[in-house]
Image (cartoon, grey):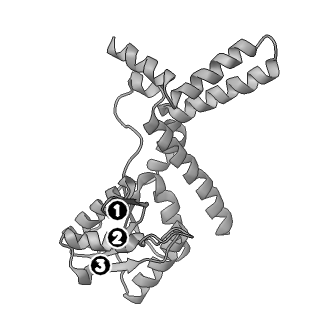
Amino acid sequence: MLIVQKIVEAFVLPPGFFVTVTLVLGLLWFKSSKGKASLLLLFSLFAYILTTSTGTFLFVRPLEKSFRKEVPQRCDAIIVLGGGVLKGPEGYELRPHAFKRFIQGVELARTYDAFLIVSGGRLPGSSQQPEATIMAELAQRFEVPNEKILIDAESKSTYENAKNVARIVKELNLKELVLVTSAIHMKRAKMSFEKFNVRVHPYPVDYLCDYGPMSWIDFVPTGESLEANMLGLHEIVGLIWYRLKMR
């Protein structure tokens, strides 16, 4: 009974509501206007894919499975790419995706006794504190020595992350580098570092796709699936753009 309740809720509340409304309207209009009805039904199908695990299998999982964690025997520096900040009641803080990257980077830096390179600026037109400085301050609270923290507070994109960090590692002659970012973002990030002739060991974190056994929840709309699929589409568009840009 609880499963039935959850399924009904999923289709009458957003984001599933939009799947239901367009599907019903498409079916009602099919006799009177097949053209409009077909468009609505196609939109309903796309909305269903975008809000369920069907979409994560198409848009997210292929990106997340592009790389596995590489753990070298020794490491000179851990590179952590920013993933967004927000201003809370007590000041600026990392968004959840950024915090997952950060906490894993800190753990690796402490394990290897390596430099922690944090990279991330502020959004264009924003007066917020640069993300890298927020990460650096937080790293000190996690007992990473200040002299082990290297900051790139200028980057506003993945391409700039790679460009600015490449300058830092080359100036300090750092060779063995581990790159920490969200699994869905790793392909574009690694591509960017290769553009600047920097070899990194990928260490993907923050997985969005559920790799457990398939269940009924995979077939109903959820906000989590919508967020994951939107990020997946963002990365696909970003990869296409970067490949054109790097030719």
Q: Which residue is mark 1?
A: 93
Q: Are marks 1 and 3 in contact (CB under 8 Å)?
A: no
**Residue at 56% of width from left, 31% of height from top?**
49
Q: Are marks 2 and 1 in contact (CB under 8 Å)?
A: yes
Residue type indicated by callout 3: Ile
Give the vertical position of 110 relative to 100 (above or below).
Answer: below
- Residue 85 x, y percent position in the rendering: 41, 61
Q: Residues within 10 Å of mark 2 (few under 14, many from 20)?
A: some
Q: Quadrant of the C terminus?
A: bottom right
Name the one closer to the observer, 44 or 122.
Answer: 122
First of labels 3, 2 by sequence position: 2
211 lies left or right of 230 = left
Name the one closer to the observer, 180 or 70.
Answer: 180
Q: Residues within 10 Å of mark 3 (few under 14, many from 20)?
A: many
Q: Which residue is mark 3?
A: 149
128 lies left or right of 22 = left
Give the vertical position of 91 relative to 1 (above or below).
Answer: below
**Residue at 49% of width from left, 64% of height from top?**
189
- SS type, badge 1: strand
Residue type indicated by callout 1: Glu
Quadrant assignment, res 40: top right
**Residue at 28% of width from left, 60% of height from top?**
104
Residue type indicated by callout 2: Ile
